[in-house]
Image (cartoon, helix red, strand yellow):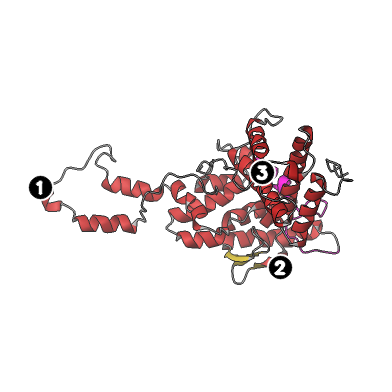
Amino acid sequence: MKEKPFPGNLNDPEGIAIWVRRFLEHQRVRHYAPTTIRATEGHLRIFIEWAIDRGIHRPNELTKPMLEAHQRWLFYYRKPSGKPLTYATQRHRLQLLKGFFRWLARENVILWNPASEIEMPRLERRLPKAILSEREVEMVIAQPDLSDPIGLRDRAMMEVLYSTGVRRAELTRLSIYDVDAERGTLTVRIGKGRKDRTIPIGERALHWLARYNDEVRPSLVMLPDAGTTFLTEKGEPVDVNALSMLMRRHINRAKIAKDGSVHIFRHSMATHLLDAGADIRAIQEMLGHVQLNTTQIYTQVSIQRLKLVHDTCHPAAKLAPSRPTEPAVDHAEDPADAAELIDALGSEDDEDEHDDGPSA
């Protein structure tokens, strides 16, 4: 695919286009993640076009009011579908822009950083759109045709996704050498944040993975074998976008009235572990979250603990309350015991309703 021409005047050594290219080179030299570099380049190309349309050609011509005007442009921008950019997308693009101007100031290209005081849009604290119940998970993973080699591959992929909660890019990069069946572990290489982690994988996922590796992968692999686990019919690693469309198709075929793709397995896995009493810090390690706050969003999705408290303590939780056979005072619960019950169920203090932090 032919690369789209870089916007701006590349013959001006002080032009904004040249400095953007230098900034991208700086990121590559510093070993930034390829996804970060692509995202940075994508939005800075848009920003260059926006600036040129307004007669701005050099970084030192930009002021804070101009960048605030760009922020308003992002707010009113509409995608081809007619939908606006989400606040998370707007915030992400502004963060990339602030990183560019911070670097320009550090390189003494500009005397001061006009982006340093831009007020970022507040983010919503949103829960995952859909969580599959255990029954619904079984309905989804039963969709692939196991008589078809690609169907067996899809079943193995879904089993690994649900068992480990790995991200889609982590699954597509999974090597046959990253799974230790004897120890029951899977190692994620260069996950988000360029970090490795080793996590458990269940016996059922290992069973389907072994079937795929023994019965299907040998017919898909092209020599020399690079070791990538999940391959297409052409012997290439499964593309992340193709994986999303594939998982969405299986979920739709299950007719469970829920929408989602790869990430729904990750959300469901975390929620089911919490429902079963798993420690949230253990879930944080398995998901590869840097901050516990990111994992804690699943405590709001996991409803079983709250229902247990509600059913135990709320006087109207049941249709017909049971009649005491003895005076209620004789069966009054010690307040200290009730407090211990709440603590045992993992109750937490209410959080301040601030939404300035990053979303999960």
- Horizontal side of residue 98 vs 271, given as left or right: right
Task: Assign the magenta stretch its main secondary structure.
Answer: loop
Answer yes or no: do the residues labelled 2 and 3 have beta carbons within 8 Å? no
Question: In the rendering, which numbered label is found on residue 177?
Answer: 2
- Horizontal side of residue 67 vs 360, given as left or right: right
Q: Which residues are magenta?
A: 224-248
Q: Using the rendered image of the protein, determine whether residue 145 is visible from the camera's viewpoint.
A: no
Residue lying farthest to the bottom in this orientation: 182
Mark 2 or mark 3: name the one nearer the start of the chain: 3
Of 96 and 334, nearer the camera is: 96
Of 277 and 290, nearer the camera is: 290
Count the marks: how many? 3
Q: Quick one: quadrant of the N terminus?
A: top right
Question: Percent x, y for residue 72?
Answer: 63, 33
Circle 3 is placed at which residue position? 93
Residue ID at (22%, 58%) = 336
SS label for mark 3: helix
Look at discs 2 and 3 and give the one toward the viewer.
3
Which amino acid does the dot numbered 1 rest on?
Pro
Question: Percent x, y for residue 277?
Answer: 42, 58
Circle 1 is placed at which residue position? 327
Measure the alpha-carbon separation of dots 1 and 2. Answer: 67 Å
Question: Percent x, y for residue 295?
Answer: 51, 54
Which amino acid does the dot numbered 2 rest on?
Tyr
Placement of 56 over or under 281, stated as above or below:
above
Look at discs 3 and 1 and give the one toward the viewer.
3
Measure the alpha-carbon separation of dots 2 and 3. Answer: 37 Å
Which amino acid does the dot numbered 3 rest on?
Arg
